[in-house]
Amino acid sequence: MEDNNVVLKMENICKTFPGVNALSSVNFQLAKGEIHTLMGENGAGKSTLIKVLTGVYKIDKGKIILNGKEIFISSTRDAQEHGISTVYQEVNLCFNLTVAENIYIGREPMKNKSINWNEMNKNATKLLEDRLNLKIDVKKTLSTYSVAIQQMVAIARAVDISRGILILDEPTSSLDANEAKQLFVVMKKLKSEGMSILFVTHFLDQVYEISDRITVLRNGEFVGTYEAKNLTRIDLISKMIGKDIGEVEKLNNTFKNTTRKLSGEKLIETHQFGKKGTIEPFDIDIRKGEVLGLAGLLGSGRSEIARLIFGIDKSDHGTIEIKKKKYSYIYPKKAILDGFGFCPEDRKVEGIVGQLTIRENIILAIQSRRGIIKYLSIKKQQEIAKKYIDLLSIKTPSMEQRIDNLSGGNQQKVILARWLATDPQLLILDEPTRGIDVGAKYEIEKLIAKLASEGVTILFISSELQEIVRSCDRVLVLRDRKIIKELIGEDIQEKNIMQAIAGRG
Ligand SMILES: Nc1ncnc2c1ncn2[C@@H]1O[C@H](COP(=O)(O)OP(=O)(O)OP(=O)(O)O)[C@@H](O)[C@H]1O
Ligand SMILES: [Mg+2]
């Protein structure tokens, strides 16, 4: 790419946190009208690179050059004034405000010292239509819209602030395949208008669908920048994890465990169990030591089944039999006492406790099972935390680090650790690998296989069909809040799941 096409240059960027070299001499260049994807394992420094660009963190060393001139960014306002805008990994929106208010918050059009609501709503409607091909009522509160639309609203705000550079940190992690496709249409349109987009994702298919170039970071270090069409997948993974191609191929050939039998005794059996408005009454049995997958689009009812079985939502229909005892509903405390674990989909809402340390977050569920009285000694807590930090390669200088200082993917691993640490008999995993890098995904799949072979039962929910196919002994496919198909053994194939989801199975 011609040098005069470069809009943004970052040179030898360094940023440290206590005990962590988050970025050491990183170089990055963004050209006009390109989509440039930043790749790297959890904790490699992607979000940090973005945050120094948007003024959240100040760089220790290095140079940022925008349109040929060195700039100094010391606040998010500075970044906005330079026309750099972002949709962060953790979307910051106000769900109780309207769509228009969310787009113009802090930048409201004024008239006679008060907000000009008409103007604001008109501008918001036009912005969404013209730039994002989206026609919605901007006067409605944001919470009435789907996650995909909310994401679009965040992007609209960023596009409106941006003068040429747009940054999207894992915007697709909570979208389903169709929604991600729609986002890509928008990204391509913005690109054709000359926008430069810096994109982060852990989905390899998406990387190749959308990127012109790819920059790889590893351990806070710059590995290289490549044309996407010249970089094979296996090459990319090998650069990300720092292992040679032969080793990556070995990782890739994860075996499908077909030796497990479905003859284990029934751990759970439901009879027309359900809850009005969330999921149609269902009859399922879950057998000891199986990996049972729930597949279907977002909103098809997968998480709803999990929440009813763990008692987060209270059923109003039918019964559930757990270890041969019948109940008309259960509640989480009971589920935990019964040896169930639940690793939720949305770690921000139901998962991490930001002010607590990694150790405290890990021991939370065990402590809750033991009750306040049987307090775990600090030494025991440290032992448990260390075991899981090692097992899941959680990247941190110390277990006493506050969890909100961890990278997104590493926070996800801590939540997984919390439930693994309880030695559950049944582990419900709702999108456990969301935001987790490729290498760690394989590790988690291996761990699932190992747990199942030891007799742990796993209820596995994932939007990534390949993951379901590799891990599950049996798969239930959902559509429109109903279980519509069961697949066993050899029939568990991506195309069969897709056909069922599409209504042709
Ligand atoms: N505020 C902070 N305080 C201390 N350490 C931090 C802070 N922010 C990030 N780090 C550390 O810096 C490193 C890089 O984190 P970063 O969030 O940039 O990773 P990432 O590449 O975005 O990972 P992921 O794919 O998991 O989102 C990690 O080791 C992380 O723990
Ligand atoms: Mg990140």
Image (tube, rainbow, N blue to C red):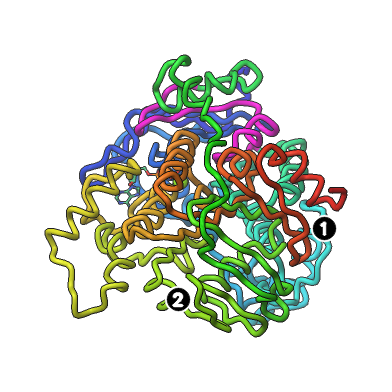
Q: Disc number at residue 129? A: 1
In-image side of 365 versus 285 (left or right) = left
Q: Disc number at residue 94? A: none
- Judging depth in this view, the residue of 349 and 245 nearest the camera is 245
Q: Is residue 212 a member of the stretch shown in magenta? A: yes
Quadrant for residue 200, please give it: top right
Q: Is mark 2 within 8 Å of ligand 1?
A: no
Tag 2 secondary structure: helix
Quadrant for residue 316, please give it: bottom right
Image x and y of residue 499, in percent: 81, 45
- Which portion, as a residue range, is magenta? 196-224
- The answer to whether residue 314 of the structure is visible from this angle is yes
Q: Disc number at residue 332? A: 2
Rendered view: 177 above or below 1? below
- Judging depth in this view, the residue of 158 and 204 nearest the camera is 204
- Give me the residue at 74% from left, 73% from top: 280
- Give me the residue at 71% from left, 69% from top: 145
Rendered view: 350 above or below 33? below
Which residue is most to the right? 504
- The answer to whether residue 198 of the structure is visible from this angle is no
Image x and y of residue 95, in percent: 60, 73
